[in-house]
Image (tube, rainbow, N blue to C red):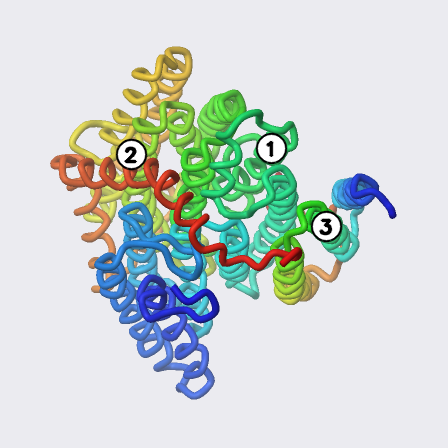
């Protein structure tokens, strides 16, 4: 490989990112040219085509696995999995947003552009194997979501949520960055494979432990794990409902992908108690706080903290068992949570007026379809069989048990039982309680129907026939865990980074 | 020559100043500047480590951090203006519609 110029295969390995950026820029350029009334359909449609093109180009990318751009990007089953996941989430988000944006009377253009730009960051996060690139893609995804959170610009709550997300997000990024600096200091490299080689060859310097802890703070914030979860309920309450569905799943999935790479591929030192503690705190704080919420968005925010805790349980397990469990869980959680937020954003109506639990009373009668679909998503969030949530929890807890994490499993199962209470509370309110005030339910437009059908199909599919998905995640997790040995050797072969001494 | 550890200690102090500023200051702009201070503390340690390892990638990282910090500043200031328009205050204690 020529060390100075990228070759054609390099570009194929970042093809989805290129395609998504092109569509994002096209939307930004067309935005001022298009008539405001038509912009919704036209630019939204363009965004939709963009995500579909992203999926197709992911398939093309998957045909040429390997490294690109001097060991900065790695295409394997693992990165393909997360590419497909985040792009699919964005596709459903765009379908949900059509109606939402029209109801809220928001200008559409930038919104779809920002979704695609954020997507570029998240896709890169899943294939980056270099801390520089991880940092940049983390920021691409974060900056887009900061703006998306404040998109209901005229609403005071939305801009407040955006401000909180931005300030705490940058605060956490600084910690992550400090961790990267320390890791560079401890190992002399920012490449995950080289770091892994340095950490597994003898005595681990103290600096590496500090680096690990600081990086975990930064990523823990992104996945909303306790004790770095304080921002979550506020931001989720104020941000536009479809965006919440998006940012509680896609950036989180990408951040989990980064965590998987850093923790498992680099075989990070001293991670166990860090993760153990964070998992227990997230599950417990999330579930207990969710019990007393009466705002549905806030309730789902606390539930998302709890789910981050369940996923962290798998991180404490043995790598070969934990990694596939994490991947399965993020997929199942994405399907059910995006679906639930699609229903919430449809019911929210103008200015997001109807988002309290009280407004859901009598929904079973006024709109059986919406109530029925929301019920299935909630059942899946509880983890009842024939839904994706059940197998997701099952694999996480069985991975933990097989790694002899008995206490963690017990705490997790108790927490699932607590969690069942507040999800069931929503179902009970929908079907058993009479509506006190009239809550108008708008007719369900075609795009939203498609979004609900997709998420519902995914939730049930993962719950009924999880076999294929499971084989796939196991294979790609294996590739992830084996990767360090092959590429560390490749690294020596072509030292791409110029050294100051040369 | 000044030893590398001096730079690292200074970068630690800068970073801690940023963290403390973030936690105790109430003006949004000042909080924002504190974050920049943290990032610059990190930059200093990158350069120091780059000198220690005789490896350019640490210095290259600093450029990326600067660019990203500038992008973040743009978005951050826009968000601050949006908040100011709806609330007419820059004190975080008054930006409290959502309970924390």
Disc 1 versus disc 2: distance between alpha carbons?
26 Å
Q: Which of marks 2 and 3 is in front?
A: 3
* Secondary structure category for the residue under label 1: helix
Q: In which quarter of the image is the C terminus of chain B?
A: top right
Depth order, front residue of B77/A407: A407
- In 3D space, how far apart are the residues under numbered discs 2 and 3 (Cα atoms)? 40 Å
- In the rendered image, residue A390, in percent from the top left (x then y), is placed at 24, 29
Q: Is residue A34 above or below residue A361?
A: below
Q: Mark 3 points at which residue?
A: B51
Determine the residue located farthest toward the front in the rendered image: A502
| Residue furthest right in the image | B1
Residue A265 versus residue A397 in the image, above or below? below
Q: Please give the name of the residue rendered at 48% of the width and 69% of the height, measured from the top-left corner.
A: A4
Specify the subunit that label 3 lies on. B
Q: Can residue A75 be seen in this view?
A: yes
Residue under label 2, please give it: A324
- Compare marks 1 and 2 and give the one earlier in the sequence: 1
Q: Are marks 1 and 2 in contact (CB under 8 Å)?
A: no
Crowdedness near tag 3: few (<14), some (14–19) or many (≥20) residues, C-alpha within 10 Å: some
Q: Position of residue A48 (x, y in %)?
A: 29, 68
Q: Name the residue under label 1.
A: A208
Q: How crowded is mark 1: few (under 14 residues within 10 Å), some or many (20 or more)?
A: many
- The location of residue A193, given as percent across then percent down, is 45, 43
Q: Is mark 2 on a helix, strand or loop?
A: helix
Residue, x 57% and y 52% (percent of image)?
A161
Q: Along the horizontal axis of the image, is B37 left or right of A249?
A: right
């Amino acid at each position: 490989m020529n060390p100075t110029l990228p070759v054609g295969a390099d570009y194929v390995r970042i093809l989805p990112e290129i395609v998504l950026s092109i569509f994002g820029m096209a939307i930004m350029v067309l935005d001022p040219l298009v008539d405001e009334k038509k912009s919704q359909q036209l630019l939204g449609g363009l965004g939709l085509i963009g995500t579909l093109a992203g999926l197709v180009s992911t398939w093309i990318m998957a045909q040429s696995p390997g490294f690109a751009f001097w060991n900065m990007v790695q295409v394997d089953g693992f990165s393909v999995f997360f590419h497909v996941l985040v792009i699919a989430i964005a596709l459903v988000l765009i379908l949900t947003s059509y109606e939402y944006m029209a109801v809220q009377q928001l200008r559409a253009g930038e919104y779809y552009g920002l979704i695609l730009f954020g997507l570029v960051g998240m896709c890169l996060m899943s294939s980056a194997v270099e801390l520089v690139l991880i940092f940049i893609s983390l920021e691409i995804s974060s900056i887009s979501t900061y703006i998306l959170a404040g998109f209901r610009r005229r609403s005071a709550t939305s801009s407040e949520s955006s401000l909180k997300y931005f300030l705490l997000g940058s605060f956490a990024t600084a910690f992550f960055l400090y961790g990267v600096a320390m890791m560079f200091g401890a190992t002399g490299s920012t490449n995950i494979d080289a770091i892994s080689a340095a950490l597994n060859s003898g005595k681990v310097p103290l600096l590496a432990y500090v680096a690990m802890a600081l990086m975990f703070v930064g990523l823990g914030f992104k996945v909303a794990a306790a004790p770095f979860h304080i921002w979550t309920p506020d931001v989720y309450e104020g941000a536009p409902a479809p965006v919440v569905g998006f940012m509680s799943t896609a950036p989180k999935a990408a951040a989990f992908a980064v965590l998987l790479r850093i923790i498992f591929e680099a075989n990070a030192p001293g991670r166990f108690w860090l993760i153990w503690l964070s998992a227990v705190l997230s599950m417990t704080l999330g579930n207990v706080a969710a019990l007393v919420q009466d705002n549905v968005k806030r309730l789902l925010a606390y539930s998302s903290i709890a789910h981050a805790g369940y996923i962290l349980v798998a991180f404490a397990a043995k790598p070969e068992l934990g990694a596939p469990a994490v991947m399965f869980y993020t997929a199942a959680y994405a399907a059910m949570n995006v679906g639930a937020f699609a229903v919430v954003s449809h019911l929210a109506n103008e200015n997001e007026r109807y988002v309290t639990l009280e407004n859901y009373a009598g929904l079973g009668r006024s709109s059986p379809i919406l109530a029925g679909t929301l019920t299935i998503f909630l059942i899946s969030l509880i983890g009842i069989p024939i839904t994706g949530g059940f197998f997701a929890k099952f694999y996480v807890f069985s991975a933990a048990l097989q790694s002899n994490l008995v206490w963690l499993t017990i705490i997790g199962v108790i927490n699932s039982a607590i969690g069942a209470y507040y999800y069931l509370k929503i179902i009970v309110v929908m079907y058993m309680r009479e509506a006190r005030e009239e809550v108008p339910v708008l007719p369900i437009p075609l795009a939203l129907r498609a979004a609900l059908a997709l998420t519902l199909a995914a939730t049930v599919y993962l719950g009924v026939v999880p076999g294929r998905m499971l084989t796939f995640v196991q294979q790609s997790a294996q590739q992830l865990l084996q990767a360090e040995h092959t590429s560390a050797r490749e690294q020596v072969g072509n030292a791409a980074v110029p050294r100051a001494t040369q | 020559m000044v030893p590398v550890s001096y730079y690292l200690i200074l970068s630690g102090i800068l970073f801690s100043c940023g963290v403390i500023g973030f936690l105790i200051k109430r003006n949004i702009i000042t909080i924002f500047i504190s974050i920049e201070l943290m990032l610059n503390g990190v930059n200093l340690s990158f350069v120091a480590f780059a000198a220690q390892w005789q490896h350019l990638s640490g210095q290259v990282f600093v450029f990326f951090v600067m660019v990203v910090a500038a992008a973040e500043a743009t978005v951050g200031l826009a968000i601050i203006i949006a908040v100011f328009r709806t609330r007419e205050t820059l004190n975080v204690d008054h930006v409290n519609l959502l309970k924390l």
